Amino acid sequence: MAPTFTSFLFFKLKSRSKTLRPPSPALLRTNDPPTEQDISRIRDAIARVENKLKKKRNHTSQESYTKFLEAHKAILSPYRRLPTELIVEIFLYYHENPADPKYNVVPWGLAHICHRWRIIALNTPALWRNLPPMRLVSVERPQLKWHTARLSTLLARSGNSPITFALTKTETTTLDDEVVTMLSEHSERWESICLTICGSVCAHFSKIKGRVPALRSLRLLLTGSLSFDIFEVAPKLRQVSLGSLTWPGIVKLPWNQITDFTEDASRTDHIVTVLHSSAEALQRLNFITDQSWALFDGTAVIRPTTLPNLTCLALQTPFETGLKSLLDALTVPALQELVLKIFTDRSLTQEVVNLLTRSQCMLRKLTIHTSPAQSIEQVLAAAPHLTTLDINDPAQNLICALTGVNAGREWTLVPCLDSLTIRVGVKFALLSELGRLARVRCDLALEGAAAADPVHVHRLQEFNVACPLLTQNVDRGFDVWAAAQFAQHCFETFGLGGAGDPTLKEAKKRLDGELCEISAVNKNSTMSRKARLVKLAKHVDTLIDHLECFDVAPESIIYLYLKRIDFTLDSLLDSQIPLEMKPPLNARVQRLVVKWGAVLIATLPIMRWGWQKDGFLTYLSGHNGSVHDIARFAFQRYKCQKCYVGLRSRSRRGQLPADVDFKKPATDLWQSEV
């Protein structure tokens, strides 16, 4: 920690002692790096004070000398002497550059650490190039003033660096035109932008037509009826993502140079255009639609097209949308990744097989989500070089085929597979079969002649089972409550033992009852907010009481782990329960997590399954070196330092229980994982 101004005053008052006189007083007031002369003088002073300290016996004098040494040794810290160029590189390395400007974060904090860091940050334009998302919807004048002041500051700090931003403007009010004008004045610096606008707003951007020479990535969400040609001249534009509600307009772009195209829309005009105009350049193509009539209904003619450089093709739709004509028209010799999320009654298996056979491509990654009745064995047989596979609700015959070994001692299907992800629906009833599949492909638990000589069999490195999700064509995030229900099911079907233990059954029943009570309180709209939060806190306290009495037998800990009780507790303590109750509850949960964690590690040979952060259950093979990193309770202690400071002040006023410990530094409140 850098010396403070208080330290400087302390040494100034003590300066009657020649020994304690600071050799470089200015360095005690700043975080500036010392010069070589300063370093020499400070080292001499430290040596002199250390010699004096050995002779001092008076406690008060010792304290003065110790503080002198601490402050001056901090000046010689290697961190303080880092060259400015290296600090800039560190800032840029840790500063996030999200692919989507909607998630831009401005590093305001770097300018508020110390004077030196502020000067460095303000003189590094690349730190300020990612503008924060701007939503100009019903903006009042005070808000607008704040928007423009912030934007003006960032545009100035970013200098001549290319800028990225996300702007939402769906109303034509002239009040917020100033923001659009400010951005337009810097259109030559636009590099990656995301615009959500309506037809009547497009006129505000007409002045930038032909003035976006640096634009590389464009995300456009349009509503209304219009033809949009503002970005028709953009010499560096390569990545385009279009989204729209139902509208008859056309977006004009430099199609022949687009390499990455995504469309989430209800029309097919643009995908047909990009296939015919960007065939040579296109590398990634993604089409998403929720409309049953959107694709290729006969009005859109797709002639046979070869895409020589296309490496990734993704098609997502829950309806029968005439995809047959698209798959039959394409030849993709360089294809490495194919994503199909098509939930229709009509099978497209033969069309996909024909596409792969016709293209003679070396497909490496395949994601194929279909209706449970669809068979994909032919597709897998046509892609022998697959290393990554993501499927849903496999039938019994497919699971058996994935465990089969041919006469050449190789896997019958996907012999080179490294990673397998299976997403199961709520009605999936073959979890025990998936457990066997994991043992066979990951641990090579083979039978018959293959077991005697498994040399030619490729070991699966990663096996994931996803929670029940409605995958359709929309990916959802990790749902703690869905995971909890899934865990109760897989606890029994994965053969983890203990399911019939009456003591565990009773404990599980009580635990589920407490969670249901908490859920009911959360949804109770008849109570006042304050009363609801107080009642919620009491239920959380009761839940923790129950968990403290929970048996620490291996089966119990496995159940708690699979149920993701740590995530549940984390979300509950992150809710707005009374602030004064959080520290003691947090401390009790932390003690539980430590106790459970030790037992969990010992149960790995029994459990063999662990939660990934993205909500997947991963098979813990004995050949997986990261087993201990995956199988552990992760409890995020509540993170708001402001809460910590507020609690300290309330503690001084006697408003918190006496057993709340604030002696630990605030950094201890950020995170703890066991």
Image: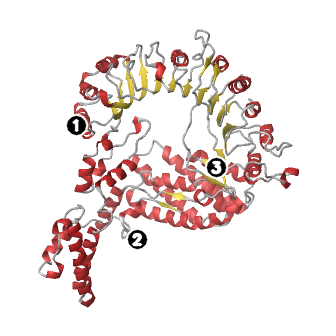
Nearer to the camera, 528 or 605: 605
Q: Earlier in the sequence, mark 3 or mark 1?
A: 1
Q: Earlier in the sequence, mark 1 or mark 2?
A: 1
Check the image and report above or below for 600 versus 350: below
Question: Is residue 516 left or right of 128 when viewed as pictured?
Answer: right
CA separation, marks 3 and 2? 39 Å
Q: Position of residue 438 (x, y in %)?
A: 73, 49
For the C terminus, give its image quadrant: bottom right
Question: Is residue 388 left or right of 240 when viewed as pictured?
Answer: right
The residue carrying pointer 1 sits among few (fewer than 14), some (14 to 19) or many (20 or more) residues within 10 Å by Cα, namely few
Residue 470 can be seen in this image: yes
Question: Is residue 168 left or right of 591 when viewed as pictured?
Answer: left
Q: Indicate which disc residue 541 carries.
A: none
Q: Position of residue 341 (x, y in %)?
A: 63, 30
Q: Secondary structure at mark 1?
A: helix
The residue carrying pointer 2 sits among few (fewer than 14), some (14 to 19) or many (20 or more) residues within 10 Å by Cα, namely few
Check the image and report above or below for 64 versus 672: below
Amino acid found under the numbered disc labelled 1: Ala
Q: What residue do we see at 36% from left, 66% from top? A: 665
Determine which residue is flagged by label 3.
Answer: 617
Determine which residue is flagged by label 1.
Answer: 149
Q: Secondary structure at mark 3?
A: strand
For the N terminus, give its image quadrant: bottom left
Check the image and report above or below for 665 versus 126: below
